[in-house]
Image (cartoon, rainbow, N blue to C red):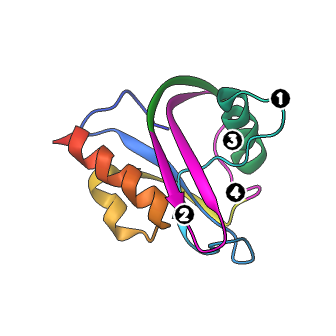
Amino acid sequence: MWDRPPSRQARLLIAKRRADDARGGLWEFPGGKQERGESLQECLARELMEELGIEVEVQEPFITVQHSYRDLHISLHTFHCRIVRGEPRAIACADWRWVAIDELADYVFPAADKRVIAELQKVDR
């Protein structure tokens, strides 16, 4: 999620996983597991409300990453979004930040998210 249309000055919203979650303490692009009967866009909107208390408009897809961890395989679908109501707050996450693409290297992310970061860096050049 961008704080304004993607550009060199734009920042992305990231969230820190709770210590007791899988991959706890790492930063991520907020989102979560899709529930039965839910579209990817509905899933993302629900998760952002639950985790950060924000209502979003889910826009076009960015990238999908397939990744296998030792304990599971994930399909990480990413989308451009914009906040339509609310200000982020840590509800179901440990913390959150707005960061520029070149600041993402200052945060520790799970492997799947690192692949998204690599694509963001390509677009930012």
Q: Which residue is mark 4?
A: 90
Of the residues tagged 4 and 3, which is closer to the observer? Answer: 3
What residue lies at 74% left-to-right and 41% top-to-bottom?
34
Using the numbered discs, state the Cα–Cα distance from disc 4 to disc 1 in whole angstroms.
27 Å
**Left of 81 or right of it: where is 94?**
right
The label shown at residue 101 is none
The amino acid type, in three-letter code, at marker 3 is Leu
Using the numbered discs, state the Cα–Cα distance from disc 2 to disc 3 in whole angstroms.
24 Å
- Check residue 103 for magenta coloring: no
Q: Which residue is mark 1?
A: 37
What residue lies at 41% left-to-right and 30% top-to-bottom?
4
The label shown at residue 48 is 3
Residue 74 drawn at (x, y percent): 60, 54
In front here: 118 or 107? 118
Which quadrant does the C terminus fall into?
Answer: top left
Of the residues tagged 2 and 4, which is closer to the observer? Answer: 2
The label shown at residue 68 is 2
